[in-house]
Image (cartoon, rainbow, N blue to C red):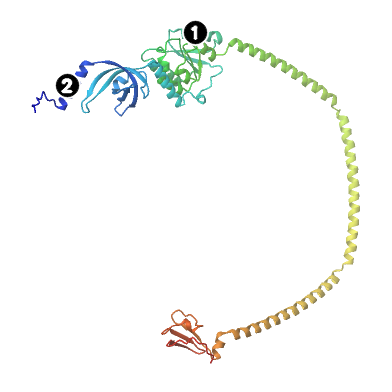
Amino acid sequence: MAEMKLGHIYTVSKLTKEIKSLLEETFPFVWVSGEISNYAVPASGHSYFTLKDDQATISGVMFKNQKSRLKFQPESGMKIIGMARLTLYEPRGSYQLIFEHLEPEGTGSIQIAFEQLKKKLSSQGFFDADHKKPIPFLPVRISIVTSRTGAAVRDILNVALRRFSNTCLEIVPVSVQGNGSADEIKAAIDLVNLQGKSDLIILARGGGSLEDLTAFNSEIVAIAIYESKIPIITGVGHETDFTIADFTADLRAPTPSAAAELALPDKISLQQKVSDLRENLRGSLKTKIKNLNQTVSHLNSRLKSPATILYDFRLRLEDYESRLSNHMNQSLVHNRQKLDWLARSLQTRQPKKQISDLRQQVNLVSRDLHLYFQTKIQNLSNCHHELDSKLRVLNPEAVLERGYSISRRVSDRHVIFDSNEVEINDEIEVILAKGQLTTRVERVNDQKKII
């Protein structure tokens, strides 16, 4: 057999290092699309997942610093496009992608972030109707949180001056887009609540793209609105624009101008309504006074003079006096007749005769009772003698005195009635009329024999 020549021999680590260098030099940065699966975030904050398509899978990782710049939260099942560095993990000899950037495939990252935050806050009750605070009918002081120079503040001021110019308007200027705008909006809402002077807050800005409305779609602004003790009306963008702030606010207006209209009633309409109510009240009072005057006139017509009233009372008093006198006379006659009847009854029922009759009854009852007790005692004595005689006949000692005895086993004191109840050498106790004997069985005879 021909001898096989060996070429350069690599160690595993050396080969792995060269493959790693080859991959990283050949694919320094690549754009990759696929579906995320097995997405996990351990305590380190880094994201580990698998990127797959219909035919293959590859491991991916995105470190915490790079992930903090994303505008959405990656999750399993999401299709993405990302820029990554291809590298090889030497301890396992497997290659993986280290992502520097991710974008949702199809839908933009801002829209994805909007939907994710909306779902999160909704599950926490931020949009629940029972948390909405009522909007005051006529606020004395309104704080407007918006840009100092935007069209929104001008629209709100124009509507407020037109609808109810007496209201005090406080402008709290903030940045409504760009870096730090969400923090400024939150700080403004917190400041108005801390001062506690305003009855209502209007949070507004003009229209713009979804990117321009980022501050109003932030969680920090939603929390500030949710925790505000003062009611908040939002008027952000155009009528078709909906933000997280709109869902969280106590009332959403389609535009800044509409927010001012919802916040303030129309002064002219209120004045007209007050005027109408005043006229209605004046008419009602006139009608009420007229009705009362008619009632007074009617009562006056029915009112009698004092002399007539006194005459009526005098007639009534005389009638009562006559009826009282008749009643007293009848009562005296009745009581006199009753007294006569009682006197006659007392004469027919002399106490001495009643005492004599009762004494005879007592003597008869006493004699009958004495006879009853004598008879009862004699019967009980006879019964006692009869029972005593029976007891003497049935007394076992009487049987023993006639010459008989009682035998029983010493071991269990069982009374013996049959010779078969004992065995040879059993100790037997014999009870006599006078004294007892202890014997031992030497023979057992089971034949009956009368002595």
Q: Is residue 190 visible?
A: no
Quarter of the image for residue 289 reads: top right
Three-letter code, disc 2: Glu
Residue at the front extreme, as displayed: 1
| Residue 430, above or below 87 | below
Q: CA distance from mark 2 to mark 1?
A: 67 Å
Question: Tag 1: Cα neighbours inside 10 Å, few (<14), some, or many (≥20)?
Answer: some
Circle 2 or circle 1, nearest the eye: 2
Q: Quadrant of the N terminus?
A: top left
Q: Earlier in the sequence, mark 2 or mark 1?
A: 2
Q: Is residue 86 visible?
A: yes
Three-letter code, disc 1: Asp
The residue singled out by tag 1 in the image is 155
**Residue 261, image x and y in percent?**
54, 12
**Residue 377, image x and y in percent?**
70, 80
The residue singled out by tag 2 in the image is 18
Quarter of the image for residue 63 reads: top left
**Residue 299, image x and y in percent?**
82, 25
